[in-house]
């Protein structure tokens, strides 16, 4: 579960390396974000120091889609799975991804939540 002040890794090639969650979107007093939720993030660290190749700047505020969490997720068939890290991908205000690739596989749960743009640019599904 992701809440305010959580540090996440960025799983796309937008140029950001780590981000901090500022706000969880999706309802009045919503406290935690799970897989497939939208959050507002601030960029804390860039992948490389070159600002020419980066699409974002340090301290910039973006929306992000949570694609990996450490918390176990229970499926309807009774099986559970979890991932090794908390990570997100940056999106703009219209919901279009900032990066052109997503590094690493993403969960199939995002397919049910109608995030087909992210599934198309990802390496694989888990």
Image: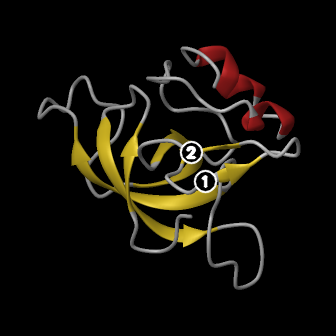
The answer for how far apart the CA atoms under marks 1 and 2 are is 5 Å
Residue 81 pos. (x, y %): 63, 42
Q: Along the line of sight, which residue is nearer the eye, 80 or 46?
A: 80
The scheme the figure's colours follow is secondary structure
**Is residue 122 shown left or right of residue 7?**
right
Q: How many other residues sit within 10 Å of disc 2, few (<14), some (14-19) or many (≥20)?
A: few
**Is residue 91 shown left or right of residue 55?**
right
The residue indicated by pointer 1 is 72
* Vertical side of 118 occupied by 28: above or below: below
Q: Residue at x 65, y 27 (%)?
A: 118
Residue at the extreme left: 49
Q: Along the line of sight, which residue is nearer the eye, 58 or 25?
A: 25
**Chain-order first, disc 1 or disc 2:** 1
Q: Along the line of sight, which residue is nearer the eye, 89 or 56?
A: 89
The residue indicated by pointer 2 is 82
Quadrant occupied by the C terminus: top right
Residue at disc 2, secondary structure:
loop
**Is residue 72 shown left or right of residue 112?**
left
């Amino acid at each position: 579960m992701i809440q305010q002040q959580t540090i996440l890794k960025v799983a796309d090639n937008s140029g950001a390396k780590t981000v901090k969650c500022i706000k969880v979107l999706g309802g009045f007093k919503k406290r935690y974000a799970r897989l497939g939720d939208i959050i507002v993030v601030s960029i804390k660290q860039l992948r490389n120091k070159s600002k020419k190749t980066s699409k974002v700047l340090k301290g910039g505020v973006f929306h992000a889609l949570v694609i990996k969490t450490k918390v176990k997720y229970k499926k309807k068939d009774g099986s559970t799975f979890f991932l090794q890290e908390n990570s997100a991908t940056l999106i703009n205000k219209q919901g279009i991804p900032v990066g052109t690739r997503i590094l690493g596989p993403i969960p199939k749960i995002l397919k049910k939540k109608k995030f087909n743009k992210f599934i198309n640019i990802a390496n694989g599904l888990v």
